[in-house]
Amino acid sequence: MPPPDRVKAHLMDEADMARTLDRLARQVVEELDDDADPAERLALVGMQTRGVHLARRLRERIEAVEGVRLPFGVLDATFYRDDVGHRAGRPTPLVQPTDIPFSLDGRRVVLVDDVVYTGRTTRAALDALTDMGRPASVRLLAFVDRGLRELPVAPDYVGRHVPTAPGELVRVRLAEEDAEDGVWLVQKGTGYGVQGT
């Protein structure tokens, strides 16, 4: 059995995460104008898996405050990654559904992910989105930015900056997937799953 990851710090609890989501929702709302129907121009797209749940929570908060129900989509960019087929010794990645039930053409999109790290997943997501349409703009919302970028990708909205060293990971846990909310800094073992690529 592989050794588990070792927890180095508990960075955020459920209340911290809720406050951070409230702040991020207010920042996204600043994209809305009064001169047109916001739902026709702005949409949230969550990246599988935890980005989907975060985007859904943001949508609910925006609707509660602004009375606007933004279009919502789900994106899995697995097959657009540049390391698919080059990850020797690692299991075949699980591909999950993509469902964007609206036109991307001319629309401003907020792409939501739990952790941004190297930038490669974001690059893959941008390739996937542009294969489906031509958005007017794409903004990246990262709940956690852990640094150590390999590509020139910078989130427009960041819940929390957590500088990490090689061998450290940020684990975001959400009740929808993990039965609890929280963010942890861990020392990587060889256990399952790596978040934040």
Image (tube, rainbow, N blue to C red):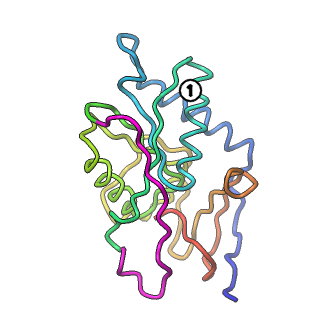
In the image, is 164 to the left or to the right of 13?
left
Q: Position of residue 183 (x, y in %)?
A: 66, 56
Pick whichever, 148 or 21, lies toward us.
Answer: 21
Pick whichever, 196 or 192, lies toward us.
Answer: 192
The answer to which image quadrant residue 78 occupies is bottom left
**Residue 88 inside the magenta-drawn segment:** yes
Q: Position of residue 155 (x, y in %)?
A: 41, 47
In the image, is 32 to the left or to the right of 180?
left
Pick whichever, 28 or 176, lies toward us.
Answer: 176
Can you identify the residue that label 1 sits on? 62
Pick whichever, 43 or 194, lies toward us.
Answer: 43
Residue found at x 48% / y 25%? 29
Q: Which residues are magenta?
A: 84-104
**Residue 183 inside the magenta-drawn segment:** no
> Label 1 neighbourhood size at 10 Å, few (<14), some (14-19), many (20+)?
many
What amino acid type should be assigned to the residue bearing mark 1? Answer: Ile
In the image, is 152 to the left or to the right of 156?
left
Residue found at x 56% / y 56%? 162
